[in-house]
Image (cartoon, rainbow, N blue to C red):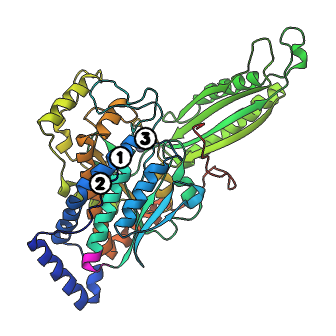
Amino acid sequence: MPIPCSVSLSLPKSLRRHMLFASTVALGFVSVVHAQSTPTAHKQVEHFVDEGAANWKLVSQEIWGYAELGYHESKSSTLLQTQLKAAGFAVQAGVADEPTAFIASYGSGKPVIAILGEFDALPGLSQQTSPDRDPVVANAPGHGCGHNLLGSGAALAAVSVKEYMQANHIAGTLRYYGTPAEEGGSGKVYMVRDGLFKDVDVVLHWHPGDHNAIINGGLLAVDSAKFTFHGVAAHAAMAPDRGRSALDAVMLMGNGIEFMREHIPSNSRVHYIISKGGVAPNVVPDLAQIDLMARNPSNTVLTGIWDRILKVAQGAALMTGTTLEVTDIGSDANIVGNDALAPVAQKNLEEVGGYTMDASQKEFALKLQKTLGIDTPPSLDETNVIEPLRPVDPNAPSASTDVGDVSWTVPTIGFSTATFVPGVAAHTWQATASAGMSIGQDGMIIASKAIALTAVDLFTNPELVKAAKVDFDRKMAGKTYQSPIPADQKPLINYRGN
Ligand SMILES: [Zn+2]
Ligand SMILES: [Zn+2]
Protein backbone atom coordinates (compact mmCIF):
# COMPACT_ATOMS: atom_id res chain seq x y z
CA MET A 1 0.00 0.00 0.00
CA PRO A 2 1.53 3.36 -0.95
CA ILE A 3 1.93 5.81 1.89
CA PRO A 4 0.54 9.29 1.39
CA CYS A 5 3.00 12.04 2.11
CA SER A 6 1.58 14.59 4.50
CA VAL A 7 4.26 17.07 5.25
CA SER A 8 2.40 20.12 3.94
CA LEU A 9 1.48 22.63 6.59
CA SER A 10 -1.89 23.72 7.77
CA LEU A 11 -1.04 25.49 10.98
CA PRO A 12 -3.61 27.11 13.21
CA LYS A 13 -3.67 30.89 12.81
CA SER A 14 -2.12 31.58 16.20
CA LEU A 15 0.87 29.38 15.44
CA ARG A 16 1.29 30.90 11.99
CA ARG A 17 1.49 34.31 13.67
CA HIS A 18 4.23 33.02 16.00
CA MET A 19 6.15 31.72 13.04
CA LEU A 20 5.82 34.94 11.11
CA PHE A 21 7.14 36.77 14.17
CA ALA A 22 10.06 34.40 14.52
CA SER A 23 10.95 34.79 10.85
CA THR A 24 10.83 38.56 11.04
CA VAL A 25 13.10 38.56 14.07
CA ALA A 26 15.48 36.16 12.35
CA LEU A 27 15.77 38.50 9.37
CA GLY A 28 16.36 41.54 11.59
CA PHE A 29 19.06 40.08 13.86
CA VAL A 30 21.47 37.57 12.45
CA SER A 31 22.37 36.34 15.94
CA VAL A 32 18.80 35.07 16.39
CA VAL A 33 19.79 32.17 14.14
CA HIS A 34 21.44 30.70 17.22
CA ALA A 35 19.06 32.08 19.80
CA GLN A 36 18.13 30.04 22.86
CA SER A 37 15.04 27.97 22.09
CA THR A 38 11.84 29.05 23.75
CA PRO A 39 8.65 27.30 24.81
CA THR A 40 7.21 28.68 21.56
CA ALA A 41 9.92 26.91 19.58
CA HIS A 42 9.12 23.65 21.34
CA LYS A 43 5.40 24.11 20.71
CA GLN A 44 6.03 24.76 17.05
CA VAL A 45 8.10 21.66 16.50
CA GLU A 46 5.70 19.52 18.57
CA HIS A 47 2.96 20.78 16.32
CA PHE A 48 4.89 19.64 13.25
CA VAL A 49 5.26 16.19 14.85
CA ASP A 50 1.50 16.06 15.44
CA GLU A 51 0.96 17.09 11.81
CA GLY A 52 3.11 14.26 10.49
CA ALA A 53 2.08 11.63 13.03
CA ALA A 54 -0.68 9.91 11.02
CA ASN A 55 1.55 9.50 7.97
CA TRP A 56 4.56 8.17 9.88
CA LYS A 57 2.41 5.76 11.87
CA LEU A 58 1.40 4.31 8.51
CA VAL A 59 5.05 4.17 7.43
CA SER A 60 5.90 2.28 10.63
CA GLN A 61 3.08 -0.16 9.95
CA GLU A 62 4.24 -0.71 6.39
CA ILE A 63 7.81 -1.47 7.54
CA TRP A 64 6.39 -3.74 10.25
CA GLY A 65 4.70 -5.68 7.44
CA TYR A 66 7.90 -5.88 5.36
CA ALA A 67 9.84 -7.31 8.35
CA GLU A 68 13.13 -7.49 6.45
CA LEU A 69 16.34 -8.92 7.93
CA GLY A 70 19.61 -7.01 8.34
CA TYR A 71 21.22 -5.66 5.13
CA HIS A 72 18.22 -6.90 3.14
CA GLU A 73 15.83 -4.13 4.20
CA SER A 74 15.44 -2.86 0.64
CA LYS A 75 11.70 -2.09 0.77
CA SER A 76 11.92 -0.51 4.23
CA SER A 77 14.94 1.61 3.29
CA THR A 78 13.38 2.70 -0.02
CA LEU A 79 10.15 3.73 1.69
CA LEU A 80 12.01 5.85 4.25
CA GLN A 81 14.17 7.41 1.52
CA THR A 82 11.14 8.22 -0.65
CA GLN A 83 9.33 9.82 2.26
CA LEU A 84 12.34 11.87 3.33
CA LYS A 85 12.96 13.03 -0.26
CA ALA A 86 9.33 14.10 -0.53
CA ALA A 87 9.78 16.05 2.70
CA GLY A 88 12.67 18.03 1.21
CA PHE A 89 15.76 16.03 2.20
CA ALA A 90 18.63 15.22 -0.18
CA VAL A 91 19.36 11.48 -0.02
CA GLN A 92 22.65 9.69 -0.54
CA ALA A 93 21.96 5.95 -0.76
CA GLY A 94 24.18 2.86 -0.43
CA VAL A 95 26.81 4.47 1.80
CA ALA A 96 29.59 2.48 3.54
CA ASP A 97 29.23 -0.44 1.07
CA GLU A 98 25.82 -1.18 2.60
CA PRO A 99 23.09 -1.33 -0.05
CA THR A 100 20.32 -0.29 2.36
CA ALA A 101 22.23 2.41 4.28
CA PHE A 102 21.58 6.06 3.44
CA ILE A 103 22.01 9.61 4.66
CA ALA A 104 19.23 12.15 4.20
CA SER A 105 20.27 15.79 4.74
CA TYR A 106 18.70 19.18 4.96
CA GLY A 107 20.34 22.58 5.34
CA SER A 108 24.02 23.49 5.40
CA GLY A 109 26.83 24.60 7.68
CA LYS A 110 27.23 24.16 11.41
CA PRO A 111 26.05 22.70 13.65
CA VAL A 112 25.55 19.26 12.14
CA ILE A 113 22.92 17.37 14.11
CA ALA A 114 22.22 13.74 13.23
CA ILE A 115 19.30 11.47 14.06
CA LEU A 116 19.73 7.69 13.77
CA GLY A 117 17.12 5.40 12.24
CA GLU A 118 17.02 1.58 12.14
CA PHE A 119 14.59 -0.68 10.26
CA ASP A 120 15.76 -4.32 10.38
CA ALA A 121 13.67 -7.18 11.77
CA LEU A 122 14.56 -10.37 13.69
CA PRO A 123 14.33 -13.96 12.47
CA GLY A 124 11.45 -16.12 13.70
CA LEU A 125 9.47 -13.37 15.45
CA SER A 126 6.61 -12.99 12.97
CA GLN A 127 3.42 -12.23 14.89
CA GLN A 128 0.00 -10.73 14.20
CA THR A 129 -1.11 -7.74 16.26
CA SER A 130 -2.85 -10.24 18.50
CA PRO A 131 -2.41 -10.94 22.23
CA ASP A 132 -1.95 -14.68 21.59
CA ARG A 133 0.94 -16.33 19.77
CA ASP A 134 -0.13 -16.19 16.14
CA PRO A 135 2.56 -15.67 13.51
CA VAL A 136 1.69 -13.90 10.25
CA VAL A 137 3.95 -16.51 8.61
CA ALA A 138 5.41 -19.32 10.74
CA ASN A 139 9.16 -18.90 11.43
CA ALA A 140 9.30 -15.73 9.34
CA PRO A 141 11.01 -12.55 10.58
CA GLY A 142 9.16 -10.02 12.71
CA HIS A 143 9.81 -6.61 14.27
CA GLY A 144 10.47 -7.93 17.79
CA CYS A 145 12.83 -5.04 18.54
CA GLY A 146 10.44 -2.40 17.21
CA HIS A 147 12.86 -1.07 14.58
CA ASN A 148 9.89 -0.32 12.32
CA LEU A 149 8.97 2.30 14.93
CA LEU A 150 12.59 3.31 15.48
CA GLY A 151 13.24 4.21 11.84
CA SER A 152 9.86 5.87 11.32
CA GLY A 153 9.80 7.79 14.62
CA ALA A 154 13.32 9.12 14.00
CA ALA A 155 12.31 10.19 10.50
CA LEU A 156 9.21 11.95 11.83
CA ALA A 157 11.47 13.85 14.24
CA ALA A 158 13.82 14.78 11.38
CA VAL A 159 11.01 15.98 9.11
CA SER A 160 9.46 18.03 11.92
CA VAL A 161 12.80 19.67 12.81
CA LYS A 162 13.33 20.45 9.13
CA GLU A 163 9.92 22.15 8.98
CA TYR A 164 10.85 24.16 12.06
CA MET A 165 14.24 25.16 10.62
CA GLN A 166 12.68 26.19 7.33
CA ALA A 167 9.91 28.22 8.96
CA ASN A 168 12.34 30.03 11.25
CA HIS A 169 15.37 30.34 8.93
CA ILE A 170 17.56 28.33 11.27
CA ALA A 171 21.11 27.68 10.05
CA GLY A 172 22.83 24.32 10.27
CA THR A 173 22.72 20.81 8.84
CA LEU A 174 20.19 18.21 9.86
CA ARG A 175 20.85 14.59 8.91
CA TYR A 176 18.93 11.37 9.18
CA TYR A 177 21.15 8.29 9.08
CA GLY A 178 19.40 5.23 7.70
CA THR A 179 21.39 2.54 9.49
CA PRO A 180 20.76 -1.09 8.49
CA ALA A 181 21.51 -4.40 10.20
CA GLU A 182 21.61 -3.28 13.82
CA GLU A 183 20.66 -6.80 14.91
CA GLY A 184 24.04 -8.48 14.74
CA GLY A 185 25.25 -6.90 11.50
CA SER A 186 27.04 -3.91 13.09
CA GLY A 187 25.79 -1.67 10.28
CA LYS A 188 26.77 1.57 12.00
CA VAL A 189 30.30 0.31 12.76
CA TYR A 190 31.13 0.36 9.04
CA MET A 191 29.52 3.80 8.68
CA VAL A 192 31.75 5.06 11.50
CA ARG A 193 34.78 3.39 9.90
CA ASP A 194 34.03 5.18 6.62
CA GLY A 195 34.11 8.53 8.42
CA LEU A 196 30.42 9.28 7.83
CA PHE A 197 30.07 10.85 11.29
CA LYS A 198 33.31 12.86 11.14
CA ASP A 199 31.72 16.30 10.85
CA VAL A 200 28.70 15.59 13.08
CA ASP A 201 28.41 17.65 16.28
CA VAL A 202 25.72 15.70 18.13
CA VAL A 203 23.89 12.42 17.47
CA LEU A 204 20.37 11.76 18.74
CA HIS A 205 18.83 8.30 18.85
CA TRP A 206 16.06 6.34 20.50
CA HIS A 207 14.97 2.76 21.06
CA PRO A 208 11.56 1.20 21.65
CA GLY A 209 11.07 -0.20 25.16
CA ASP A 210 8.44 -0.62 27.85
CA HIS A 211 9.20 2.58 29.75
CA ASN A 212 10.12 6.23 29.11
CA ALA A 213 13.70 7.16 30.02
CA ILE A 214 16.92 8.70 28.81
CA ILE A 215 19.66 6.45 27.42
CA ASN A 216 22.76 8.17 28.76
CA GLY A 217 25.44 5.55 28.25
CA GLY A 218 25.35 1.89 29.19
CA LEU A 219 24.75 -1.24 27.14
CA LEU A 220 27.46 -3.80 26.58
CA ALA A 221 30.39 -3.71 24.22
CA VAL A 222 30.33 -6.93 22.19
CA ASP A 223 32.85 -8.72 19.96
CA SER A 224 31.92 -11.76 17.92
CA ALA A 225 33.54 -14.08 15.38
CA LYS A 226 33.48 -17.51 13.83
CA PHE A 227 36.46 -19.63 14.92
CA THR A 228 36.98 -22.35 12.30
CA PHE A 229 39.48 -25.15 12.89
CA HIS A 230 40.89 -27.17 10.00
CA GLY A 231 42.24 -30.66 10.71
CA VAL A 232 42.81 -33.90 8.82
CA ALA A 233 40.03 -36.42 8.17
CA ALA A 234 40.69 -40.10 8.83
CA HIS A 235 38.87 -43.33 9.69
CA ALA A 236 38.01 -42.84 13.36
CA ALA A 237 38.50 -46.57 14.23
CA MET A 238 41.01 -47.86 11.68
CA ALA A 239 43.44 -44.93 11.41
CA PRO A 240 42.72 -42.23 14.03
CA ASP A 241 46.46 -41.62 14.36
CA ARG A 242 46.43 -40.21 10.84
CA GLY A 243 43.68 -37.75 11.66
CA ARG A 244 43.80 -34.37 13.38
CA SER A 245 40.42 -33.51 14.84
CA ALA A 246 39.02 -30.03 14.32
CA LEU A 247 36.25 -30.96 16.79
CA ASP A 248 38.89 -31.64 19.47
CA ALA A 249 40.11 -28.10 18.92
CA VAL A 250 36.58 -26.74 19.25
CA MET A 251 36.06 -28.64 22.52
CA LEU A 252 39.42 -27.54 23.92
CA MET A 253 38.63 -23.96 22.99
CA GLY A 254 35.29 -24.32 24.80
CA ASN A 255 37.08 -25.71 27.87
CA GLY A 256 39.61 -22.91 27.73
CA ILE A 257 36.81 -20.36 27.67
CA GLU A 258 35.11 -22.03 30.65
CA PHE A 259 38.33 -21.94 32.72
CA MET A 260 38.97 -18.35 31.64
CA ARG A 261 35.47 -17.32 32.74
CA GLU A 262 36.52 -17.37 36.42
CA HIS A 263 39.27 -14.87 35.75
CA ILE A 264 37.44 -12.16 33.85
CA PRO A 265 35.22 -9.45 35.40
CA SER A 266 31.97 -11.06 36.53
CA ASN A 267 29.83 -8.60 34.55
CA SER A 268 31.26 -10.07 31.33
CA ARG A 269 29.35 -12.46 29.07
CA VAL A 270 30.86 -15.11 26.83
CA HIS A 271 28.40 -17.24 24.89
CA TYR A 272 28.85 -19.56 21.93
CA ILE A 273 27.50 -22.40 19.85
CA ILE A 274 29.25 -25.20 18.00
CA SER A 275 28.09 -24.20 14.54
CA LYS A 276 29.97 -27.03 12.79
CA GLY A 277 31.03 -30.22 14.55
CA GLY A 278 31.86 -32.80 11.90
CA VAL A 279 29.73 -34.97 9.64
CA ALA A 280 29.88 -38.52 11.05
CA PRO A 281 31.18 -40.09 14.27
CA ASN A 282 33.36 -42.57 12.36
CA VAL A 283 35.20 -39.82 10.49
CA VAL A 284 37.73 -37.65 12.33
CA PRO A 285 36.28 -34.15 11.65
CA ASP A 286 38.56 -32.08 9.46
CA LEU A 287 36.39 -29.00 9.98
CA ALA A 288 34.66 -27.66 13.09
CA GLN A 289 33.58 -24.21 14.16
CA ILE A 290 32.61 -22.16 17.21
CA ASP A 291 30.43 -19.09 16.70
CA LEU A 292 31.18 -16.94 19.75
CA MET A 293 30.20 -13.61 21.30
CA ALA A 294 31.87 -11.85 24.25
CA ARG A 295 30.54 -8.79 26.07
CA ASN A 296 31.52 -6.36 28.80
CA PRO A 297 30.21 -2.92 29.86
CA SER A 298 33.55 -1.41 28.80
CA ASN A 299 34.96 -1.53 25.29
CA THR A 300 38.48 -1.26 26.70
CA VAL A 301 38.02 -4.19 29.13
CA LEU A 302 36.45 -6.24 26.34
CA THR A 303 39.47 -5.67 24.09
CA GLY A 304 41.62 -7.36 26.74
CA ILE A 305 39.18 -10.28 27.09
CA TRP A 306 38.99 -10.67 23.31
CA ASP A 307 42.80 -10.92 23.05
CA ARG A 308 42.70 -13.73 25.61
CA ILE A 309 39.93 -15.55 23.72
CA LEU A 310 42.07 -15.39 20.57
CA LYS A 311 44.98 -16.92 22.52
CA VAL A 312 42.72 -19.70 23.87
CA ALA A 313 41.69 -20.47 20.27
CA GLN A 314 45.32 -20.46 19.09
CA GLY A 315 46.22 -22.75 22.02
CA ALA A 316 43.47 -25.18 21.02
CA ALA A 317 44.85 -25.28 17.48
CA LEU A 318 48.38 -25.83 18.78
CA MET A 319 47.29 -28.68 21.07
CA THR A 320 45.47 -30.52 18.30
CA GLY A 321 47.71 -29.93 15.31
CA THR A 322 44.96 -28.07 13.51
CA THR A 323 44.90 -24.63 11.98
CA LEU A 324 42.70 -21.75 13.01
CA GLU A 325 40.80 -19.26 10.89
CA VAL A 326 38.94 -16.34 12.51
CA THR A 327 36.28 -14.80 10.26
CA ASP A 328 33.08 -12.74 10.23
CA ILE A 329 34.31 -10.51 13.01
CA GLY A 330 31.59 -8.30 14.45
CA SER A 331 31.79 -5.64 17.11
CA ASP A 332 29.70 -3.01 18.89
CA ALA A 333 31.14 -0.63 21.49
CA ASN A 334 29.34 0.29 24.71
CA ILE A 335 27.50 3.62 24.68
CA VAL A 336 29.41 6.64 25.96
CA GLY A 337 26.97 8.93 27.76
CA ASN A 338 26.98 12.71 27.64
CA ASP A 339 26.33 14.60 30.87
CA ALA A 340 25.82 17.93 29.12
CA LEU A 341 23.08 16.54 26.87
CA ALA A 342 21.41 14.20 29.39
CA PRO A 343 19.68 16.85 31.55
CA VAL A 344 18.40 18.65 28.45
CA ALA A 345 17.07 15.40 27.00
CA GLN A 346 15.49 14.54 30.36
CA LYS A 347 13.79 17.92 30.59
CA ASN A 348 12.47 17.55 27.05
CA LEU A 349 11.14 14.05 27.66
CA GLU A 350 9.40 15.33 30.79
CA GLU A 351 7.98 18.24 28.81
CA VAL A 352 6.57 15.85 26.19
CA GLY A 353 5.25 13.47 28.85
CA GLY A 354 4.02 9.93 28.29
CA TYR A 355 0.64 8.75 27.05
CA THR A 356 -2.40 7.03 28.53
CA MET A 357 -3.81 3.92 26.88
CA ASP A 358 -7.42 4.05 25.79
CA ALA A 359 -9.91 1.31 26.77
CA SER A 360 -9.23 -0.97 23.79
CA GLN A 361 -5.44 -0.61 24.17
CA LYS A 362 -5.80 -1.50 27.87
CA GLU A 363 -7.85 -4.58 27.04
CA PHE A 364 -5.22 -5.74 24.55
CA ALA A 365 -2.37 -4.96 26.95
CA LEU A 366 -3.92 -6.89 29.85
CA LYS A 367 -4.45 -9.95 27.63
CA LEU A 368 -0.87 -9.73 26.35
CA GLN A 369 0.53 -9.39 29.89
CA LYS A 370 -1.15 -12.73 30.77
CA THR A 371 1.18 -14.46 28.27
CA LEU A 372 4.33 -13.12 30.00
CA GLY A 373 4.26 -15.51 32.97
CA ILE A 374 4.94 -12.66 35.41
CA ASP A 375 3.17 -12.84 38.80
CA THR A 376 2.65 -9.11 39.10
CA PRO A 377 3.04 -7.41 35.73
CA PRO A 378 3.88 -3.69 35.77
CA SER A 379 1.00 -1.22 35.78
CA LEU A 380 -0.28 -0.04 32.40
CA ASP A 381 0.15 3.50 33.73
CA GLU A 382 3.91 3.04 33.16
CA THR A 383 3.41 4.50 29.67
CA ASN A 384 2.65 7.78 31.41
CA VAL A 385 5.68 7.78 33.70
CA ILE A 386 8.97 9.48 32.83
CA GLU A 387 11.75 7.83 34.78
CA PRO A 388 14.24 10.09 36.57
CA LEU A 389 17.75 10.48 35.22
CA ARG A 390 19.84 7.76 36.86
CA PRO A 391 23.52 6.83 36.60
CA VAL A 392 24.13 3.70 34.54
CA ASP A 393 24.48 0.50 36.58
CA PRO A 394 27.31 -1.47 34.91
CA ASN A 395 26.08 -4.67 36.59
CA ALA A 396 22.50 -4.50 35.33
CA PRO A 397 21.60 -7.11 32.69
CA SER A 398 21.91 -5.50 29.31
CA ALA A 399 22.28 -6.03 25.57
CA SER A 400 24.39 -4.33 22.92
CA THR A 401 23.90 -1.87 20.07
CA ASP A 402 26.02 -0.43 17.28
CA VAL A 403 24.93 3.03 18.47
CA GLY A 404 27.87 2.46 20.85
CA ASP A 405 30.45 2.92 18.09
CA VAL A 406 28.82 6.18 17.03
CA SER A 407 28.96 7.40 20.65
CA TRP A 408 32.74 6.79 20.78
CA THR A 409 33.06 9.20 17.84
CA VAL A 410 30.43 11.92 18.43
CA PRO A 411 28.61 13.29 21.52
CA THR A 412 25.46 11.15 21.67
CA ILE A 413 22.25 11.06 23.69
CA GLY A 414 19.25 8.75 23.41
CA PHE A 415 15.72 8.04 24.54
CA SER A 416 13.75 4.93 25.29
CA THR A 417 9.97 5.22 25.12
CA ALA A 418 7.12 2.91 26.06
CA THR A 419 6.20 1.30 22.76
CA PHE A 420 5.86 -2.21 24.16
CA VAL A 421 3.15 -3.18 26.63
CA PRO A 422 4.68 -2.72 30.13
CA GLY A 423 6.52 -5.91 31.10
CA VAL A 424 7.21 -6.95 27.50
CA ALA A 425 10.89 -7.40 26.66
CA ALA A 426 12.45 -6.77 23.26
CA HIS A 427 13.10 -9.75 20.98
CA THR A 428 9.80 -11.46 21.79
CA TRP A 429 6.63 -12.04 19.78
CA GLN A 430 4.83 -9.84 22.30
CA ALA A 431 7.15 -6.99 21.26
CA THR A 432 6.36 -7.65 17.58
CA ALA A 433 2.64 -7.46 18.38
CA SER A 434 3.03 -4.19 20.29
CA ALA A 435 5.23 -2.64 17.57
CA GLY A 436 2.62 -3.24 14.87
CA MET A 437 -0.29 -1.53 16.59
CA SER A 438 -1.41 1.73 18.17
CA ILE A 439 0.39 1.15 21.50
CA GLY A 440 3.73 1.04 19.70
CA GLN A 441 2.80 3.96 17.51
CA ASP A 442 1.71 6.16 20.43
CA GLY A 443 5.02 5.44 22.16
CA MET A 444 6.83 6.28 18.93
CA ILE A 445 5.33 9.77 18.84
CA ILE A 446 6.71 10.45 22.35
CA ALA A 447 10.18 9.62 21.02
CA SER A 448 9.73 11.74 17.89
CA LYS A 449 8.79 14.74 20.02
CA ALA A 450 11.59 14.30 22.56
CA ILE A 451 14.17 14.01 19.76
CA ALA A 452 12.70 16.97 17.88
CA LEU A 453 12.74 19.21 20.96
CA THR A 454 16.34 18.29 21.71
CA ALA A 455 17.40 18.91 18.10
CA VAL A 456 15.75 22.35 18.19
CA ASP A 457 17.64 23.13 21.42
CA LEU A 458 20.89 22.14 19.73
CA PHE A 459 20.22 24.21 16.62
CA THR A 460 19.31 27.29 18.63
CA ASN A 461 21.85 27.07 21.45
CA PRO A 462 25.50 26.85 20.36
CA GLU A 463 26.57 26.74 24.01
CA LEU A 464 24.83 23.38 24.38
CA VAL A 465 26.68 21.95 21.36
CA LYS A 466 29.95 23.22 22.85
CA ALA A 467 29.19 21.78 26.28
CA ALA A 468 28.39 18.40 24.69
CA LYS A 469 31.80 18.41 23.00
CA VAL A 470 33.59 19.38 26.24
CA ASP A 471 31.93 16.50 28.10
CA PHE A 472 32.73 14.13 25.23
CA ASP A 473 36.42 15.13 25.26
CA ARG A 474 36.52 14.70 29.04
CA LYS A 475 35.04 11.19 28.83
CA MET A 476 37.32 10.13 25.98
CA ALA A 477 40.54 11.44 27.57
CA GLY A 478 43.13 8.66 27.51
CA LYS A 479 40.82 6.32 25.56
CA THR A 480 40.97 5.34 21.93
CA TYR A 481 38.26 3.80 19.82
CA GLN A 482 39.29 0.87 17.74
CA SER A 483 36.94 -1.67 16.27
CA PRO A 484 38.38 -5.21 16.01
CA ILE A 485 36.74 -5.52 12.60
CA PRO A 486 39.63 -5.75 10.12
CA ALA A 487 40.08 -2.64 7.99
CA ASP A 488 39.54 -4.61 4.78
CA GLN A 489 36.46 -6.55 5.96
CA LYS A 490 33.39 -5.48 4.00
CA PRO A 491 29.96 -5.46 5.70
CA LEU A 492 28.77 -9.06 6.02
CA ILE A 493 25.70 -8.61 3.85
CA ASN A 494 24.67 -12.26 4.20
CA TYR A 495 25.51 -12.65 7.89
CA ARG A 496 22.15 -14.27 8.52
CA GLY A 497 22.90 -16.82 5.83
CA ASN A 498 20.14 -15.25 3.73
ZN1 LIG B 1 17.27 -5.83 19.19
ZN1 LIG C 1 16.83 -2.86 18.74
Q: Is residue 15 left or right of residue 402?
A: left
Picture coordinates of residue 120 (x, y %)? Answer: 45, 45
Residue 56: give its label.
Answer: 2
Whether residue 207 is visible = no
> How far, Cα to Cα, is label 1 from label 2?
10 Å
- Ligand 1: does it lie within 8 Å of the C-beta at label 3? no
Q: Earlier in the sequence, mark 3 or mark 1?
A: 1
Main secondary structure type of the part rendered in magenta: helix
The residue that mark 3 highlights is 67
Would you call the spot at circle 3 few (<14 residues within 10 Å), some (14-19), or many (20 or more)?
many
- Residue 62, labelled with which disc? 1
354, above or below 172, in the image: above
Q: Residue at x 28, y 86 (%)?
A: 31
Residue 49, image quadrant: bottom left
Which three-letter amino acid code belongs to the residue tagged 1?
Glu
> What percent of the width, then of the height, locates residue 490?
65, 52
The image quarter in which residue 487 lies = bottom right
Q: What stretch is highlighted in magenta?
A: 166-170
Q: Which amino acid does label 2 sit on?
A: Trp
Q: What element carries label 2?
A: helix
Q: Residue pushed farthest bottom?
A: 28
Asked if residue 114 lies in the magenta stretch, the reply is no
Q: In this view, does 323 lie to the left or right of 386?
A: right
- Find out whether the residues at labels 3 and 1 contact each other: C-beta distance under 8 Å: no
Find residue 296 and report its horizontal and vertical position in percent. 51, 41
Residue 193: x and y, percent?
A: 59, 59
Question: Of helix, strand and loop, which one carries label 3?
Answer: loop
Judged from the image, the secondary structure of the residue bearing numbered disc 1 is helix
Amino acid type shown at disc 3: Ala
Q: In which quarter of the image is residue 167?
A: bottom left
